[in-house]
């Protein structure tokens, strides 16, 4: 009898040519999806020693580069060579002491920089100096553990947001003179673990928007105008909310949770947020940890075709 392995994440690259998936069998699979037919497996990346939670494609400016994180406490960065099946491990980070739950690439304007969040209560930032030399720094982020990381748009200084098991959302800013990350703001509003955070792409309105979701069945929209952050909670959800994800335009938010429903939300002119579309009974991957879910309906549809593989 074949063993069933849960898929934890799936992402397409910027050009929609490749789909990467990861699962509890410790493997990362890369598929060619360029011809809109059933995805064609071109490479299985093996290097992790535990379930792989997330995959993240870097901006194509740097080539075809994929980052992965795992329960095995490591982050790995892979780069594709001249042929589709030629992939090389160009960076491995092993300094976390517990599961690495989340990864996110910085805006490409800052360079090839990756942030990661770990159950060891820290976040880490990894900067590529050359392909064989990386600089890494760890930040004491959240009591109990860090579940999610997301970078701010490249309009201001380098900033990213984290969500943790202390029920907090924290914003981190790079102090350029001291060359260290400082906790710029701590946002309180959740009453249980924060499962995901997502910084919205720039809306061109002179404000920052962050979405967060949690074990408390809440989704909170945080909006910064000047130096103050205000919060607005979406209608209460029936179950834990695992994932929030912005459309590339920054004006539509996708929310998915433990009830296997995906809803789309947008802000009205009066500042209220309404749902305008919902897909019910979406077959989601088993969330281990629960922050790792398929990130769009397109990727979910592609991943569903792989269930028999």
Image (cartoon, rainbow, N blue to C red):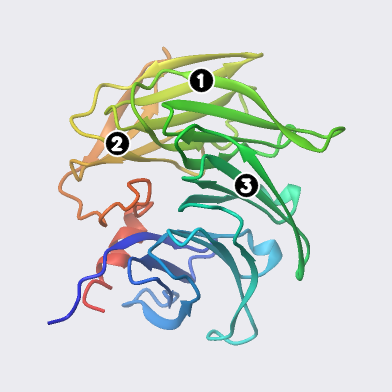
Answer with left or right where residue 73 lies relative to residue 185. Answer: left
Answer with left or right where residue 220 lies relative to residue 217. Answer: right
- Residue 143: x and y in percent read 49, 32
- Residue 256: x and y in percent read 29, 41
Work out whether 179 lies above or below 32: above
Tell me which label, 1 or 3, sits earlier in the chain: 3
In the rendering, which numbered label is found on residue 241? Answer: 2
In the rendering, which numbered label is found on residue 124? Answer: 3
- Residue 112: x and y in percent read 71, 56
Check disc 1: other Cα within 10 Å, few if <14, some if 14-19, many if 20+. some
Q: Under tag 2, what secondary structure?
A: strand
Work out whether 223 lies above or below 298: above
In the rendering, which numbered label is found on residue 187? Answer: 1
- Residue 16: x and y in percent read 48, 66
Q: Under tag 1, what secondary structure?
A: strand
Question: In percent of the image, x 41 and y 78: which residue is there?
Answer: 35
Answer with left or right where residue 256 lies relative to residue 93. Answer: left
Question: In percent of the image, x 65 and y 85: which residue is there?
Answer: 82
In the rendering, which numbered label is found on residue 244? Answer: none
Which residue extends farthest left? 1
Answer with left or right where residue 194 lies relative to residue 143. Answer: left
Quadrant location, the C terminus: bottom left
Which residue extends farthest front? 97
Q: Nearer the viewer, mark 2 or mark 3?
A: 3
Work out whether 200 lies above or below 42: above
Q: Under tag 3, what secondary structure?
A: strand
Q: Quadrant of residue 14?
A: bottom right
């Amino acid at each position: 009898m074949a063993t069933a392995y849960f898929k934890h994440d799936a992402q397409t690259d910027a050009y929609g040519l490749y789909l990467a998936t990861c699962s509890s069998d410790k493997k990362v699979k890369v598929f060619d999806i360029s011809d809109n037919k059933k995805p064609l497996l071109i490479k299985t990346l093996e290097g992790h020693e535990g379930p792989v939670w997330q995959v993240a494609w870097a901006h194509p400016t740097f080539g075809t580069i994929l980052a992965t994180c795992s329960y095995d406490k490591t982050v790995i960065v892979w780069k594709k060579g001249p042929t589709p099946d030629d992939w090389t491990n160009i960076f491995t980070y092993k300094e976390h002491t517990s599961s690495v739950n989340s990864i996110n690439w910085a805006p490409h304007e800052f360079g090839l920089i990756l942030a990661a969040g770990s159950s060891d209560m820290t976040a880490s930032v990894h900067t590529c100096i050359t392909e064989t030399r990386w600089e890494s720094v760890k930040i004491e982020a959240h009591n109990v553990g860090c579940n999610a990381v997301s970078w701010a748009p490249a309009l201001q200084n380098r900033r990213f947001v984290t969500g943790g098991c202390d029920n907090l959302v924290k914003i981190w800013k790079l102090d350029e003179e001291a060359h260290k990350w400082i906790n710029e703001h701590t946002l309180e509003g959740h009453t249980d673990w924060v499962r995901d955070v997502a910084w919205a792409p720039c809306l061109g309105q002179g404000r920052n928007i962050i979405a967060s979701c949690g074990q408390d069945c809440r989704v909170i929209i945080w909006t910064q105008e000047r130096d103050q952050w205000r919060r607005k909670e979406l209608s209460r959800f029936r179950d834990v909310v695992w994932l929030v994800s912005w459309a590339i335009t920054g004006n539509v938010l996708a929310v998915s949770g433990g009830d296997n429903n995906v809803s789309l939300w947008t802000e009205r002119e009066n500042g209220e947020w309404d749902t305008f579309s919902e897909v019910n009974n979406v077959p989601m991957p088993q969330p281990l940890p629960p922050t790792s879910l398929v990130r769009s309906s397109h990727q979910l549809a592609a991943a569903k075709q792989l269930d028999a593989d």
